[in-house]
Image (cartoon, grey):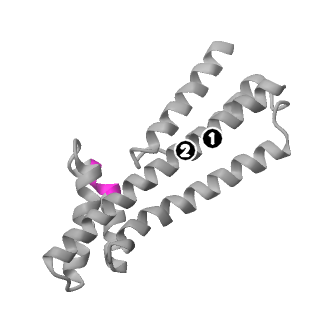
Amino acid sequence: MTILGWILIIALFGVGMAGAVFPVLPGALAIYLAFFVYGWFFGFGAFGAWFWIIQTLIVVVLFVADYIVGAWGTKKFGGSRLSVILSTIGVIIGPFAIPAFGLIIGPFIGALVGELISGSSLSKSAKVGWGSLVGLFSSMVVKVILQIAMIVVFFIWIGRY
């Protein structure tokens, strides 16, 4: 059972880290679930209130930062509210519509179309599309850093037990 427990925990960590890049995967929630799997297999004794407070705060910051950083790129390059919304939809739909490149093309097209609908020129719309990609990649970096922090805190915590 020990091996099965660690296989599940590591698999959830892997899914979580992949979720930082592929928004269709659960990301931080998979990592958070890994902590429960550890508890179910090995006991919750290693965790205290501070562990759960720290991890929950990281997850909350992660979710808030994910939206803010992603929208920031579009807004920073002059995007409208519609561009932010369509760029976000593009992030979600893009990987399904165009499997190999949809994660990049989806938000770009979403922001571009949002700006064109809002009456902007093609030049400005393309600039906003580029901004959506800057926001997307910045968001990925933030997610990877915070999710690695979650995993590191977990190993430090259980190592103390």
The alpha-carbon separation of the residues under discs 1 and 2 comes to 6 Å
Q: Where, by quadrant of the figure, is residue 93 drawn?
A: bottom left
Circle number at residue 145: 2
Q: Is residue 87 visible?
A: yes
Picture quarter with the N terminus: top right
Q: Does the magenta stretch include residue 160?
A: no
Q: Which quarter of the rendered picture does the C terminus lie within?
A: top right
Depicted 74 relative to depicted 133: above or below: below
Residue 91 in the image: above or below residue 25: below
Which residue is at a point 85% across and 30% down the rendered structure image? 45
Mark 1 touching mark 2, by CB under 8 A?
yes
The residue that appears at 22% across and 55% down in the rendered structure is: 105
Find residue 149 and name its label.
Answer: 1
Segment tinted magenta in the rendering: 91-95
Residue 130, given in percent of the width and then of the height, sits at 26, 63
Horizontally, residue 132 falls left or right of residue 141, namely: left
